[in-house]
Amino acid sequence: MNNSKTFAVAASVAALLSLSACNSEPEVVTANAPDPQAEALQNAAPVELPPAIQASRTYRCKDNSLVYADFYTNNTVKVRGDRNEPGTILTRGEGGGAYKAEGYSVSDNVGTITYAAPGKGSQSCKA
């Protein structure tokens, strides 16, 4: 039994010695290493951020329906009749005026608007 303990200790010491000889140089980490993507990043097109939401309002219309409107900083508004639907993007022309698209119309980004949708007439709505 004593021989088996001695053999086990000798085997483990031999294994440790053989592993300690592997890659005895320390790992060098430098912060100034060249970036492999530096040239690609310099030549990349500039990234344009999406427009920010300027105001988000819920309007109650004359027919007692709700209209949800998100006004963006790029002269657009997203309108929805239901909070969970994707909505329709309306744009305003260069000279101002109402936001319009696909039969929809929103008069302005104010507390009381005139809203029109396909299949519905134009009506007044309050925030």
Image: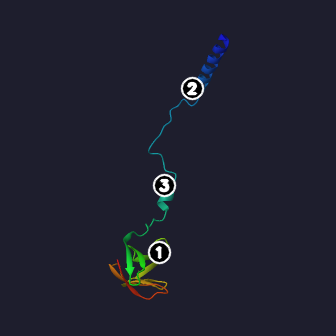
Q: Earlier in the sequence, mark 1 or mark 2?
A: 2
Q: Could you tell me which secondary element the residue under label 3 belongs to?
A: helix
Q: Earlier in the sequence, mark 1 or mark 3?
A: 3
Q: Position of residue 72 (x, y in %)?
A: 39, 73
Seen at 67% across and 11% down, the residue is 1
Q: Position of residue 63 (x, y in %)?
A: 41, 84
Kindly indicate the quadrant of the structure image that contains residue 78. Answer: bottom left
**How packed is label 1: few (under 14 Cα within 10 Å), some, or many (20 or more)?**
few
- Nearer the observer: mark 1 or 2; the answer is 1
Q: Which quarter of the image is occupied by the C terminus?
A: bottom left
- Nearer the observer: mark 1 or 3; the answer is 1
**Which residue position is annotated with label 2?**
20
Q: State whether residue 11 is above or below residue 120.
A: above
Q: State whether residue 53 is above or below residue 30.
A: below
Q: Is residue 107 visible?
A: no
**Which residue position is annotated with label 3?**
38
Q: Position of residue 51 (x, y in %)?
A: 41, 70
Q: Residue 17 or 65: which is nearer the viewer?
A: 65
**How packed is label 3: few (under 14 Cα within 10 Å), some, or many (20 or more)?**
few
Instruction: Left or right? Give the position of 114 relative to 2.
Output: left
Kindly indicate the quadrant of the structure image that contains residue 64. Answer: bottom left
**Which residue position is annotated with label 1?**
82
* Label 1 to label 2: alpha-carbon separation: 68 Å
What residue occupies the far bottom of the structure in this picture?
A: 121
Q: Is residue 41 visible?
A: yes
* Label 1 to label 3: alpha-carbon separation: 46 Å
Which colour scheme appears in the figure?
A: rainbow
Q: Could you tell me which secondary element the residue under label 2 belongs to?
A: helix
What residue occupies the far top of the structure in this picture?
A: 2
Amino acid at pointer 3 = Ala
